[in-house]
Image: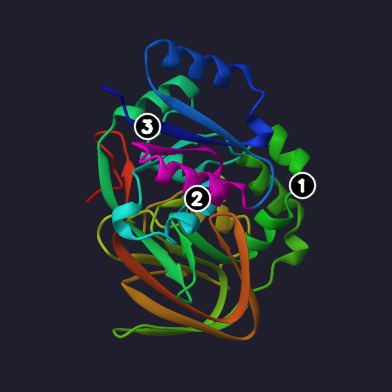
């Protein structure tokens, strides 16, 4: 009996790492049908996903960081729900925020074994302006400027901590965004230092921006850090669970943010700019292979 193949779509920057090669070889030696495809430029991921779907793959594994996972999610959403294979991740990025938050092992062989054997749970996705999807979080404000400007060499050397260090070095850029956020139940208007829209909980290299978010509750968690917060108290506030009057938390299945000036949101590592952002949640949009237990499942 032939076994449906699993596809590993591997970021080209990581293709030569011995631990990944050894893990793939070990699994193949055990009889697992694991196909590997290596991306070199934008568009490769979608082409390989089309191939995987045509082959009726058992699991689609993304080998990369949050940005690679985002590209795969946006590609999958171009196919009908019954065509989308279960998704999994081999975390190979700088921060790996989504993989970390759901408990995916960092070690390649362990992550691949989980991807091949774990239960595929239906999870939500978030959508912006009916055309851009994200699985983990959208962040706007000072934090977005920092994550998009952090040098690659610094990220390679320090990983997620590089975002915090670069932020401390760029306090001259600390200025709020004036905006209005509206849902059916509530409205907020003011100056925001950081805005986080979470399907997942952490972003920016491990910062718990939406600590109560769940990936299967058909809700988005919204955190607004107002302009009354300043560094370093901002960094301290993100590590505490007690109430802070300058941090606003809301939940909604959809809401709209408008601003008179152009703002940029970081969607799982991918920048997206505009003056109007409509956020909505898509319940049980994809299936994702997750460890058990997983704290992000309600």
For the point 31% across and 26% down, which residue is it? 3
Do callouts 1 and 3 mark residues in contact (Cβ within 8 Å)?
no
Point out residue 81 in the picture as x, y percentages from the top left corner: 31, 58
222 relative to 98, above or below: below
Q: CA distance from mark 1 to mark 3?
A: 31 Å
Would you say residue 151 sits in the magenta stretch?
no
Point out residue 253 in the picture as x, y percentages from the top left corner: 31, 72
Q: Secondary structure at mark 2?
A: helix
Residue 120 seen in this snapshot = yes
Position of the N terminus, as image quadrant, is top left
- Residue 72's disc is 2
The residue nearer to you, when weighing 13 against 254, is 13
Q: Which residue is mark 1?
A: 151
**First along the sequence among labels 3 and 2:** 2
For the point 45% across and 75% down, which residue is it? 130
**First along the sequence among labels 1 and 3:** 3
Would you say residue 51 sits in the magenta stretch?
yes
- Residue 249's disc is none
Using residue 55 as the reference point, say whether residue 264 is left or right of it: right
**The furthest residue to the left:** 298
Using residue 13 as the reference point, say whether residue 57 is left or right of it: left
Q: Residues within 10 Å of mark 2 (few under 14, many from 20)?
A: many
Q: Which residue is mark 3?
A: 115
Q: Which residues are magenta?
A: 43-68
**First along the sequence among labels 1 and 2:** 2
């Amino acid at each position: 009996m032939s076994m449906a193949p699993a596809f590993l779509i591997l970021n080209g920057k990581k293709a030569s790492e011995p631990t990944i090669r050894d893990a793939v070889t070990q699994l193949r030696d055990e009889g697992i049908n694991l196909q590997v495809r290596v991306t070199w430029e934008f568009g490769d991921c979608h082409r390989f996903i089309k191939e995987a779907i045509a082959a009726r793959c058992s699991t689609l594994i993304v080998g990369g960081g949050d940005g690679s996972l985002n590209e795969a999610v946006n590609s999958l959403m171009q196919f009908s729900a019954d065509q989308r294979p279960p998704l999994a991740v081999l975390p190979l990025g700088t921060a790996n925020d989504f993989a970390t938050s759901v408990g995916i092992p960092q070690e390649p062989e362990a992550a691949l074994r989980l991807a091949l054997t774990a239960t595929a749970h239906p999870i939500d996705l978030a959508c912006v302006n009916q055309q851009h999807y994200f699985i983990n979080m959208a962040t706007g404000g000072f934090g977005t400027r920092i994550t998009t400007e952090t040098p690659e060499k610094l990220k390679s050397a320090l990983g997620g901590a590089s975002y915090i260090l670069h932020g401390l070095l760029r306090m001259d850029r600390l200025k709020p965004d004036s905006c209005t956020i509206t849902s059916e139940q509530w409205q907020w208007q003011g100056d925001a230092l950081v805005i986080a829209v979470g399907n997942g909980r952490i972003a920016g290299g491990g910062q718990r921006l939406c600590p109560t978010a769940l990936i299967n509750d058909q809700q988005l968690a919204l955190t607004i850090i107002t302009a009354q917060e300043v560094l370093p108290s901002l960094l301290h506030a993100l590590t505490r669970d007690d109430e802070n009057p300058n941090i606003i938390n809301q939940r909604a299945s959809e809401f709209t943010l408008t601003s008179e000036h152009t703002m940029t949101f970081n969607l799982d590592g991918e920048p997206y700019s505009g003056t109007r952002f409509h956020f909505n949640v898509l319940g049980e949009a994809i299936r994702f292979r997750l460890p058990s237990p997983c704290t992000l499942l309600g």
